[in-house]
Image (spheres, rainbow, N blue to C red):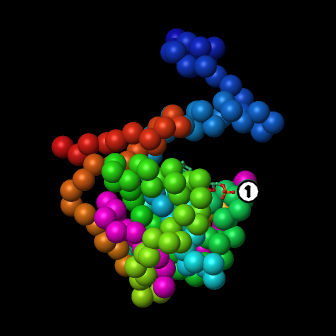
Amino acid sequence: MIKTDNGILGMTPFTPDPANPRQLRDAFGQFATGVTIVTVATDKGPVAITANSFSSLSLDPPLVLWAPDKSSRRCAYFTQAQHFAIHVLGQEQTDLCWQVAKDGNCLADANLPQNAEGVPILPDCLARFECSHYATYPGGDHEIVVGQVIRAAMRNTGDALAFFQGQTANITST
Ligand SMILES: Cc1cc2nc3c(=O)[nH]c(=O)nc-3n(C[C@H](O)[C@H](O)[C@H](O)COP(=O)(O)O)c2cc1C
């Protein structure tokens, strides 16, 4: 008989404990993701956030989702925005990933172009999804923001920036 707990099969079982989220955070970190930057226009200029909770959702209608943390000081900008843009980062954008994670206003002086809806957009990403707000759902300590893709762009070449075990990594296309 195959046992699936008690460390057999090389895995350590645990029960998630909200008072001590380290283990669950680490287990979530075993799921390798891409990395995105989400941008919005605000009355204080462009606000951005690094997010790996992005997922494609639907082709018809074209929908994507991501999840802002309610405890982030930037959260309300993204849940209230009628329009936002999600940028899939390439491996050469590692520094940008960490800069935006640290400072949501760091693109204020970058003189970014804006799309037709006034959303600041980043050049030279692997893909960009320009969205209008479609729905927001409760997601525990996060909000789940669903965007309808009204315009998209992509590059045909380039390596991806990935996030795995709390660190960035590169994924090389063949
Ligand atoms: C690779 C990476 C992925 C992240 N993904 C998310 C995410 O999906 N949702 C989120 O709210 N914050 C995410 N963050 C954290 C935010 O980018 C940012 O660091 C956080 O909002 C900072 O808190 P503050 O807005 O209060 O300054 C991520 C950070 C990194 C480095």
Residue 149 located left or right of residue 20: left
Question: Where the C terminus falls, by quadrant?
Answer: top left
- Outermost residue to the front: 109
SS of the residue under disc 1: loop
Within the magenta stretch, is there residue 77?
no
Q: The residue under label 1 is which amino acid type?
A: Ser
Query: From what the image shows, is residue 102 above or below residue 172?
Result: below
Q: Where is residue 19 in the image (x, y as percent from the top left)?
A: 81, 36
Residue 110, placed above or below residue 22: below
**Who's the residue at 56% across and 54% down the image?**
101
Disc 1: which residue: 71
Query: Which residue is at a point 25% across and 63% down the rendered structure image?
Result: 155
Which residue appears at 69% of the width and 70% of the height? 76
Query: Is ligand 1 closer than 8 angstroms to the Cβ of mark 1?
Result: yes
Position in image of residue 124 (x %, y %):
31, 64
- Please state the extent of the stretch shown in magenta in the rendering: 118-142
Is residue 24 depicted above or below 138 in this figure?
above
Residue 98, placed above or below residue 85:
above
Q: Which residue lies furthest to the right in this view?
A: 19
Tell whether 60 sits left or right of 1: left
Residue 92 seen by the camera:
yes
At a point 34% along the width and 69% down the height, the residue shown is 123
Total marks placed = 1
Residue 149 seen in the figure:
no
Q: Along the line of sight, which residue is nearer the eye, 145 or 157?
A: 157
Q: Residue 80's quadrant in the figure?
A: bottom right
